[in-house]
Amino acid sequence: QSSVDVKLERGTLFLDARQAAEPESDWTPLHEEYTAGSYHREFRISNKIDSAGVSATMKNGVLEVRLPKHAAEQPRQIEVATG
């Protein structure tokens, strides 16, 4: 059992995760990437990121965080008025 919290605050992306201990079993893994416990990571993100569009999904134990950029300003023609 694990839980993940993702928060964006003042230009910093916070990831907090908790991994519960696995129940006892008859086999022993050769290698474990993470053991039971809590994890915390922080990432500074660019002001070019659209904070309203940030999203996170978890699928098959993989966390995917999408950080879309703001739409680029479109160039426009400025009409010159004559007076």
Image (cartoon, rainbow, N blue to C red):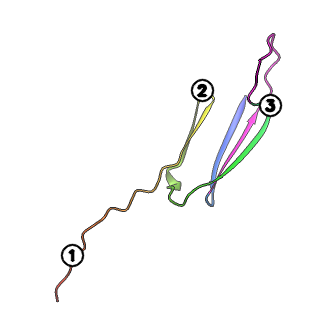
Quick one: label 1, few (<14), some, or many (20+) residues within 10 Å? few
Residue at the farthest left position = 82
Tell me which residue sits at (51%, 54%) in the image: 52
When the figure is inspected, residue 76 is found, relative to residue 38, above or below; the finding is below
Circle 2 residue: 60
- 81 left or right of 74 in image: left
Instruction: Determine which residue is flagged by label 1.
Output: 79
Which of these two is toward me, 79 or 8?
Answer: 79
Question: At label 3, which amino acid type do we have?
Answer: Ala
Q: Which mark is residue 28?
A: none
Residue 35: name its quadrant: top right
Image location of residue 70, percent across then percent down: 45, 57
Q: What label does residue 36 carry, if any?
A: 3
Secondary element at tag 1: loop
Q: Image point 19% across, 82% down: which residue?
A: 81
Q: Amino acid at mark 2?
A: Asn
Alpha carbon distance from label 2 to label 1: 54 Å
